[in-house]
Amino acid sequence: MKHIKYDTDKYNFRPMIEDMVEQPNLEDLHKHQNSNELLKLETEQATPFHKLYYSKVRDHKFFSVYKSFIKKIIKPLFDDEEIVYQKIPTFRTQFVNNIGVGKWHRDKDYSHPSYESNFFLPVTDAYDTNTVWAESEVDKKDYSPITIKYGQCVMWDGANLRHGNKINETDITRVSFDFRCMKLSDYNKTERTEKQSIVTNMSLVIGQYYEVM
C-alpha cells in the first residue's frame, strides 16, 4: 500500500461532500439514517446520502476538483503515462453499528481487471472497525484495518486482495470515496467487453465507467 498526502485546501473534498449530502457533520450521519438495518450488497449504495451524492456529483464543483486531483496527484504515480480512471468515484458510508460494503470480496470478483489499482480516500478519520480491512497478500487472510485520515489517500491492490468491513463499533460514521485507475497501455478493450459494475450495471469500459486522461 502506498500512502499519498495532498492539500485539503486545494482539494477540499470534505466540504463539497457535506454540501452534496446536505449534512454539515459527516461523523454523525448515522443519526440521520432512517433505518438501522444491516446493509447488504443490494442496499449499500442506496442510502439517502448515496442518492443525493449521485444525483448531484456530475454538476457539482466536486467533479472538476476530482479530475484535477486525478491529473495532478494520481497520474504521476503511473509515470505520467495516459491513464484510464473511474469517471465517477464511488461514494461510501459506514454508519455506527453497520458496514459499508455487503460482502468480503476482491474487486476482480465483480468484473474489475486484476491489473487495476484502487484508491481509498476518506473525508473522516478511518480507523479500527469503521474502515476497510484487507489482507496483506493474496489469499493470506491476515486482515488488518487501513488506518488513514482526511488529507491522505491510499493506493492499494483491491482488485486482488480480499477486503471488507467489520461492524463499526466506533462512535463515528466513516465517509469516503474510492476510485480505480490503470495505465491506458494496460487497458484490454476486448477483455472489458460486456463487463458490468455489480450495483449499477454500468459497462466497465472507456466512455462509460472509465475515462482517459
Image: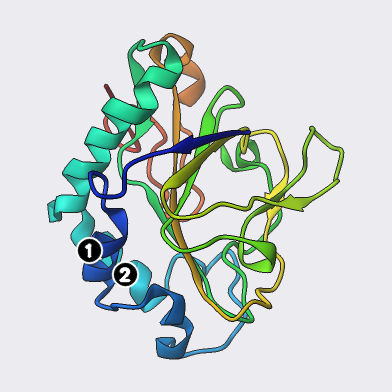
Residue on which disc 2 sits: 51
Question: Which residue is drawn at the image coordinates 61% and 60% (left, top)?
Answer: 131
Task: Look at the picture and state if 8 lies above or below 23.
Answer: above
In screen coordinates, is 179 left or right of 137? left
Residue 88: x %, y % from top left: 31, 45
Sort mark 2 into few (<14), some (14-19) or many (20+) by Cα contacts within 10 Å: some
How crowded pointer 1 is (Cα within 10 Å; few <14, some 14-19, many 20+) is rated as few
Residue 211 in view here:
no
- Image quarter where the C terminus lies is top left
Label 1 with label 2: CB-CB less than 8 Å: yes
* Residue depicted at x 29% and y 36%: 69
39 or 65: nearer the eye?
Answer: 65
Q: Amino acid at mark 1?
A: Ser
> Which residue, given by chain and number where applicable, does mark 1 sit on?
55
In-image side of 24 versus 154 (left or right): left
| Rendering coords of residue 19 (x, y %) | 21, 69
Image location of residue 30, percent across then percent down: 48, 83
The image position of residue 205, as x and y in percent, is: 37, 29
Q: Quadrant of the N terminus?
A: top right
